[in-house]
Image: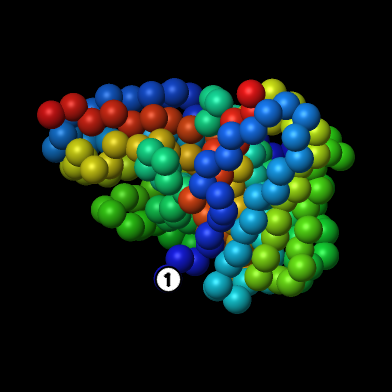
């Protein structure tokens, strides 16, 4: 069974469109995250949610809106896509979101904006 | 603010040779340190982590890392590299409930 899953794996779209990426974890964790990995492989935290509540919101454009319908799901909706949004987006989860928790990562979603 | 530096963008090692990947961190308190591996087209997998205690930590796949507070380092080692170890390796420091990653080191394994 996949611990952290994301859909879709690949997403190709035009500038200006709105798209969503879904993430689900079956580990029973309380905390979930979204990371962005740019073309140089640099990974940066975007958001984290603990038990459906937003905990971390880094300096991300407000075109990005995370939504957590329950603690097993954290979706990422992106409005008015721009070329610079092209990246690999990783979802992750951890037990309680403390500094000593291991984060478990999904396989990533490669977003290409044309 | 916490930060991680991985000075080597890529390293090439012959199969069977030993490996050391460097990682230096900056953090004001006791650091919680991690090494993750990312195979091509895959997510990140935890290799090992350090919180406290013994400064030499063992991980999966035969990897180990040594925490040296005086040098602010947490270098990853493996005595004998296999072709399947070719991947991107990320060092990370955890603080204030966020993981801060280095820019990664790409490991290439030559026959």
Look at the picture and state if A100 lies above or below B107.
Answer: below
* Front one among A57 and B51: A57
Which quarter of the rendering shows the N terminus of chain A? bottom left
* Front one among A70 and B2: A70
Residue at x 20%, y 38% (from the top left corner): B83
Residue B20: x and y in percent read: 33, 35
Asked which quadrant contains residue A83, the reply is top right
Q: Which residue is mark 1?
A: A1
Asked which quadrant contains residue B75, the reply is top left
Count of marks placed on residues: 1
Does A22 sit left or right of A70 as displayed? left
* Secondary structure type for disc 1: loop
Chain bearing tag 1 is A
Q: How is the image coloured?
A: rainbow
Q: Is residue A54 visible?
A: yes
Look at the picture and state if B24 lies above or below B57.
Answer: above
Residue B69: x and y in percent read: 54, 44
Does B28 sit left or right of B22 as displayed? right
Residue at x 38%, y 38% (from the top left corner): B40
Within 10 Å of the Cα at label 1, are there few (<14), some (14-19), or many (20+) other Cα atoms?
few
């Amino acid at each position: 069974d996949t611990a952290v899953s994301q859909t879709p794996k690949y997403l190709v779209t035009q500038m200006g469109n709105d798209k969503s990426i879904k993430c689900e974890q079956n580990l029973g964790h309380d905390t979930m995250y979204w990371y962005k990995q740019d073309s140089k492989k640099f990974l940066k935290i975007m958001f984290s949610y603990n038990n459906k509540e937003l905990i971390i919101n880094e300096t991300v454009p407000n075109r990005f809106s995370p939504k957590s319908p329950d603690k097993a799901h954290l979706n990422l909706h992106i409005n008015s896509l721009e070329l610079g949004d092209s990246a690999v987006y990783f979802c992750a989860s951890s037990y309680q979101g403390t500094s000593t928790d291991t984060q478990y990562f999904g396989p990533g979603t490669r977003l290409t904006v044309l | 603010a916490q930060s991680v530096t991985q000075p080597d963008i890529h390293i090439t090692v012959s199969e069977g040779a030993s490996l050391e990947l460097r990682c230096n961190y900056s953090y004001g308190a006791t650091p919680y340190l991690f090494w993750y591996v990312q195979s091509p087209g895959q997510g990140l997998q935890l290799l090992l982590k350090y919180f406290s205690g013994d400064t030499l930590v063992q991980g999966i796949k035969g990897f180990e890392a040594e925490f040296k507070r005086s040098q602010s380092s947490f270098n990853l080692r493996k005595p004998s590299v296999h072709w399947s170890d070719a991947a991107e390796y990320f060092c990370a420091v955890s603080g204030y409930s966020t993981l801060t990653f280095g820019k990664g080191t790409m490991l290439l394994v030559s026959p």
